[in-house]
Image (cartoon, rainbow, N blue to C red):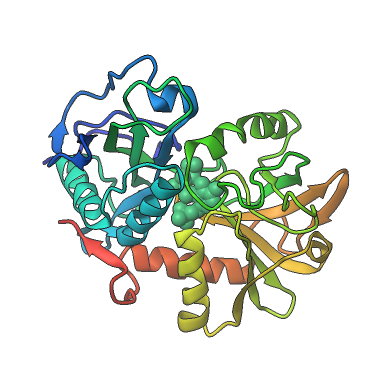
Amino acid sequence: MEKKNIDWSNLSFAYMKTDYRYVSDFKNGAWDEGRMITDDTVTISECAGVLQYAQTVFEGLKAYTTQDGKIVTFRPDLNGERLENSARRLEMPVFPKDRFVDAVIETVKANIGYVPPYGSGATLYIRPYMFGSNAVIGVKPADEYQFRVFTTPVGPYFKGGIKPITIRITDFDRAAPHGTGHIKAGLNYAMSLHAIVDAHNQGYDENMYLDAQTRTKVEETGGANFLFVTKDGKVVTPKSDSILPSITRRSLIYVAKEYLGLEAEEREVYVDELKDMAECGLCGTAAVISPVGKIVDHGREICLPSGMDEMGPVTKKLYDTLTGIQMGRIEAPKGWIYVIE
Ligand code: PLP
Ligand code: COI
């Protein structure tokens, strides 16, 4: 398929309809064999579980064009595994991870003309999701579900690309202990919308959420995990049962240790420690690694020594190595890269 005529280098992180999407229906206790369709709309009952009680979970991953012209995706098996866990927590049927990976690959293949070229700075974002589709009026799980995958070409998640952003510590909570913060459920994002609109209105790019129980520990943002570098060069990421287990973050910890020879650990990170950090970044599929230059804690400014102009040096090395692996410039660990075409 020919490349679509798109201004790849000026894409933002926005939805663009592409040609095909994958659909599989769950009815009478089983998933059907699935199919590729062109219709980008969904018709469901006005009383569907997803519309009334937010029974929906999703994933996010990307397809990349590598330096030598292959189309690849990054660790889709881990997204499949996470969607299985998300579904279990919301009493939804599991869409098996092997079928998930096949569906992702098929959907990218069907939309291959939308995969941005190497070096354009853009990627093809892949959005698998599932939802309760039949009518439920009492509070209970639906009996019927749809699993779908669509794709959309995207540019950077934050407007400035890799320019450092300013975030604030918010008084809103994202997730409760023993709640749903560790799964990728739409409900976690719905309840973050007021906090992000308020943050933007106050001039901040994002919110730093704290642990809801003690409000002393760093959790994550609405759409990414945190990564810090201490003044002695150690990479640290917050450990918590109520944050999303980011595939990017887990990959970066491996890259830090095995490719860069750095010390890296996942541990609780206290708000009190922020003033002593050398670098801070947000990591995730959409965010990649977005550097943080300033954290504002109720008027108190914590300025990271790496500043507001550039990524810190360790963050930059992590960024270059991870994106190098994804774009085929650096050899990947076994099993990380799935070649689509
Ligand atoms: N945390 C939240 C709340 C997210 O929405 C995301 C995005 O998927 C992440 C973290 C990063 O996870 P991943 O690296 O698997 O994309
Ligand atoms: C992702 O990084 O894939 C996300 O889901 C984050 C955001 C777009 C919700």
Query: Which residue is most to the bottom?
Result: 261
Q: Is residue 61 above or below residue 197?
A: below
Q: Quarter of the image containing the N terminus?
A: top left
Q: Residue at x 39, y 23 (%)?
A: 136
Determine which quarter of the picture holds residue 307.
Answer: bottom right
Q: Residue at x 71, y 34 (%)?
A: 199
Residue 275: tell me if it is visible: yes
Query: Is 185 displayed left or right of 66 in the figure?
Result: right
Q: Which percent across, then down, holds residue 195? A: 68, 34
Q: Which percent across, then down, holds residue 328? A: 30, 67
Q: Residue at x 61, y 33 (%)?
A: 191
Q: Which percent across, then down, holds residue 42? A: 28, 22
Q: Residue at x 45, y 61 (%)?
A: 247
Query: Is 237 displayed left or right of 339 in the figure?
Result: right
Query: Is 2 displayed left or right of 234 in the figure?
Result: left
Q: Quarter of the image containing the C terminus?
A: bottom left
74 or 190, nearer to the observer: 190
208 or 66, nearer to the observer: 208
